[in-house]
Amino acid sequence: MATEPFDFRSADGHQLSGRLDLPDGAPRAFALFAHCFTCTKQSIAAVRIARALTQRGIGVLRFDFTGLGESEGDFADSTFSGNVRDLVAASAEMAGKGMVPKLLIGHSLGGAAVLAAAGDIASVTAVAVIGAPFDVKHVTLQFGDRLPDLMAKGEAEVDLGGRPFTMRRSFIDDLHRHDQAARIADLKRALLVLHSPIDQTVGAENAGAIFQAAKHPKSFVSLDDADHLLTKPSDAAYAADVIAAWASRYLGAEVEWAEELPEKRVVVEETGGGKYQVEIKTGRARFLADEPVDVGGLGSGPTPHQLVAAGLGACTTMTLRMYAERKGWPVAHIRTVVEHVKEKSDLAQPDLFTRSITLTGDLDAEMRARMIEIAEKCPVHKTLASGARIATQEAGGI
């Protein structure tokens, strides 16, 4: 993962400090992360989730809200509305640099902020919230017995997470202006709600209320025994895995690829990640290949021989499906397992590919025997069995 500074001006004129985390190779999408109340871009959850998402090809901007971390401004003057404006400003800066955010992720009050900001960021197609409150006024529970003084005097010092912060009544007055229920109902984006059932800071009933208010498509994932701040690395990594897998349906990365390669062309190019990692492009498909960690690779994708075995397995399964369909045979499911062995003691011996085929369906013995015969006619099988000619030439400079 590469990380670089990403500073920008807020709508209120403050210089906000951000970090842009980028994956190895071209990002397939960009996300904008909003940290929890009084946290910073360096919070455990922010860093770990950003790191995990970059490993899945998603670039992530995390930044300090006004008055926090390395950003300018006085936190005492901040408001929830200001946080929402900060998010909108961040998204505009990203878009202006060709990194249009499609995914918003918010943690705790940051989750409430992304729900509020989503309607003002047209590019966003998916929103994920972690431990988020349904009603933004929930945050005042953290002020404890200092709340009456704050309301009466207009300002008070409160203890938040073991640190003193000066809060003003203007912060609370602003909270009353936000109707999150209406916003969530009108979100018009795919929504993922992640929450721990034992969250002691923001109770799980908040997740239920958010989920009930939202319209489909919506999903809920329990974070089991995670704490509110996701302090355990395994909890942050799990949340990132779920977000990345869920969001892939809504990010529409495939339509962002500049061109569809000709059917018979495969382009393999180094990504710069590790020693051997390459990106493979064919048609509209994009994926990584690599070598195992024990030989100096990152283990981030199939090896070259695994790709050859995968080609044989895919071709076998497809050929058998075509034959069964043409014959009208009741083949319910086809599974092909391919193992590759290279005889190191006798290099003159050709490589051995062992193919095991499982056929599910009401087939008699004659049908099954014929299907195994047809496997021998798969085009990739014929290529491997007969050998192939390879012509190599230099393409010239890039």
Image (tube, grey):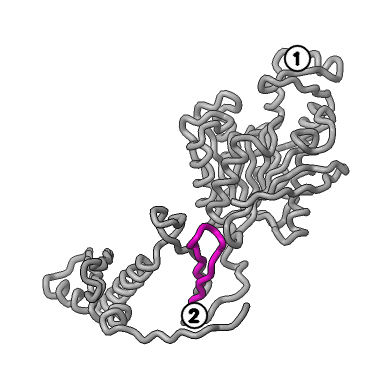
Q: Residue at x 51, y 75 (%)?
A: 267
Q: Residue at x 74, y 52 (%)?
A: 91
Q: What's the residue type where badge 2 is placed?
A: Arg
Q: Is residue 289 left or right of residue 205?
A: left
Q: What's the residue type where badge 1 is placed?
A: Arg
Numbered label tally: 2
On the image, numbered disc 2 is attached to which residue?
265
Q: Which quadrant would residue 351 be assigned to in this image?
A: bottom left
Q: Position of residue 20 (x, y in %)?
A: 68, 50
Q: Are marks 2 and 1 in contact (CB under 8 Å)?
A: no
Q: Which quadrant would residue 382 be assigned to in this image?
A: bottom left
Q: Residue at x 54, y 67 (%)?
A: 270
Please name whichever residue, 327 or 126, is drawn nearer the observer in this view of the structure.
126
Task: Work out whether 335 lies above or below 81.
Answer: below
Q: Secondary structure at mark 1?
A: helix
Task: Classify mark 1: residues with Cα within 10 Å, few (<14), some (14-19) or many (20+).
Answer: some
Q: Which quadrant would residue 87 be assigned to in this image?
A: top right
Please name whichever residue, 314 or 212, is drawn nearer the observer in this view of the structure.
314
Q: Position of residue 193 (x, y in %)?
A: 56, 41
Can residue 101 be seen at all in this image of the molecule? yes
On the image, numbered disc 1 is attached to which residue?
146
Can residue 209 be seen at all in this image of the molecule? no
Task: Classify mark 2: residues with Cα within 10 Å, few (<14), some (14-19) or many (20+).
Answer: few
Quarter containing the C terminus:
bottom right
Q: Position of residue 172 (x, y in %)?
A: 79, 26
